[in-house]
């Protein structure tokens, strides 16, 4: 089977790279499966502290592969439901990763590729990067990516760009909250480096708990359940192994043991 995805782990960072630059890194069912497997493997690998998603070539990803879309047109409802379920599984795998995830975006990110960006915790894009939720142009909707895209860019912006399918540039994506940093072309690695170093310097268990905390409190009323739940979470992490190490190292003015492990990787 042709490999559409590669993974490299170095210095605590798992870099997952899409390799179909001949078709602008458009994804089909094979590539979706390979991306799921790559993320699952990186999540399970103790040598990986941070997961970076990127691609080769001029464009991050053109979204769904045209040949794959043609095949979907010939499939029945159940077969299309199964296909959609696999893409939904990919988005869920990235969004629910216990490890920090980052997307590095160059060129075009269209259709489902916007979902890949939105599912990552952090996104960095070049100035010339462009985004488009293009589905309505061909009579479709950005269905399985919608929970993540709306959460990233907000309902009001989604109402415009889901309906118009207008292309928007990286500066707009940053304004909306879809992208965190915008850098010059060719500077993705240098722009991402200090963010990655910040992540590598933090407690892995605490970052996992912080991600869970965000999911727990997002779009919830601040009621008794939220107050009790957040209190329970901080109490739990304070008595955890890494919580104890973090507090001890701070009070003793020394580096925590996870920093030592990172420097040796």
Image (cartoon, rainbow, N blue to C red):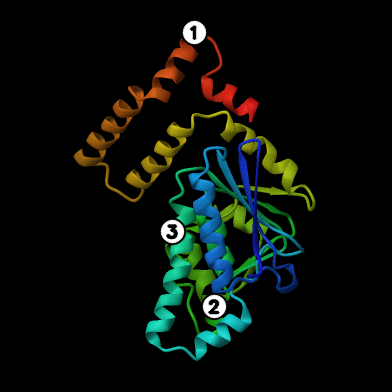
Q: Nearer the viewer, residue 148 or 7?
A: 7
| Dot 1 crowding, Cα within 10 Å, few <14, some 14–19, many 20+ | few
Residue 194 horizontal side relative to residue 76, left or right? right
Q: Is residue 102 visible?
A: yes
| Residue at x 68%, y 49% (from the top left corner) | 182
> Most extreme residue toward the left, as rendered?
224
| Residue at x 43%, y 58% (from the top left corner) | 92
Vertical comparison of 174 with 113: above or below: above
Q: N-terminal of the two: label 1 or label 2? A: 2
> Most extreme residue toward the bottom, as rendered?
74
User: Can you identify the residue that label 3 sits on?
Assistant: 92
Is there CB contact under 8 Å for labels 1 and 3? no
User: Can you identify the residue that label 1 sits on?
Assistant: 252
- Checking the image for residue 135, the label placed there is 2
Percent of width and height locating residue 232: 26, 31
- Which quadrant of the rendered structure holds the N terminus? bottom right
Vertical comparison of 123 with 49: above or below: below
Residues under labels 3 and 2: Cα distance?
20 Å
Percent of width and height locating residue 66: 62, 81
* Image-quadrant location for residue 135: bottom right
């Amino acid at each position: 089977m042709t490999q559409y995805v590669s993974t490299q782990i170095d210095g605590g960072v798992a870099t997952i790279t899409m390799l179909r630059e001949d078709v602008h890194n458009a994804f089909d069912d094979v590539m979706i499966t390979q991306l799921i497997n790559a993320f699952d493997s990186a999540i399970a690998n103790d040598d990986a502290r941070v997961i970076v998603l990127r691609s080769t070539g001029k464009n991050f990803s053109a979204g769904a592969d045209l040949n794959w879309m043609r095949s979907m047109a010939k499939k029945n409802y159940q077969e299309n439901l199964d296909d959609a379920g696999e893409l939904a599984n990919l988005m869920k795998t990235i969004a629910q990763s216990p490890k920090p995830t980052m997307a590095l975006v160059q060129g075009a990110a269209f259709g489902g590729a916007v979902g890949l960006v939105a599912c990552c915790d952090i996104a960095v894009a070049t100035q010339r990067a462009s985004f488009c939720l293009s589905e309505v142009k061909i009579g479709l909707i950005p269905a399985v990516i919608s929970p993540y895209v709306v959460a990233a860019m907000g309902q009001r912006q989604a109402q415009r760009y889901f309906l118009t399918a207008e292309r928007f540039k990286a500066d707009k994506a940053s304004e909306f909250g879809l992208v965190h940093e915008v850098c010059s072309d060719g500077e993705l690695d240098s722009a991402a480096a200090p963010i990655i170093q910040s992540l590598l310097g933090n407690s892995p268990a605490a970052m996992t708990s912080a991600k869970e905390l965000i999911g727990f409190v997002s779009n919830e009323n601040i009621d008794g359940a939220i107050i009790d739940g957040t209190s329970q979470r901080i109490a739990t992490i304070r008595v955890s192994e890494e919580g104890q190490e973090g507090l001890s190292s701070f009070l003793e003015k020394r580096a925590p043991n996870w920093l030592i492990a990172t420097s040796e990787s």
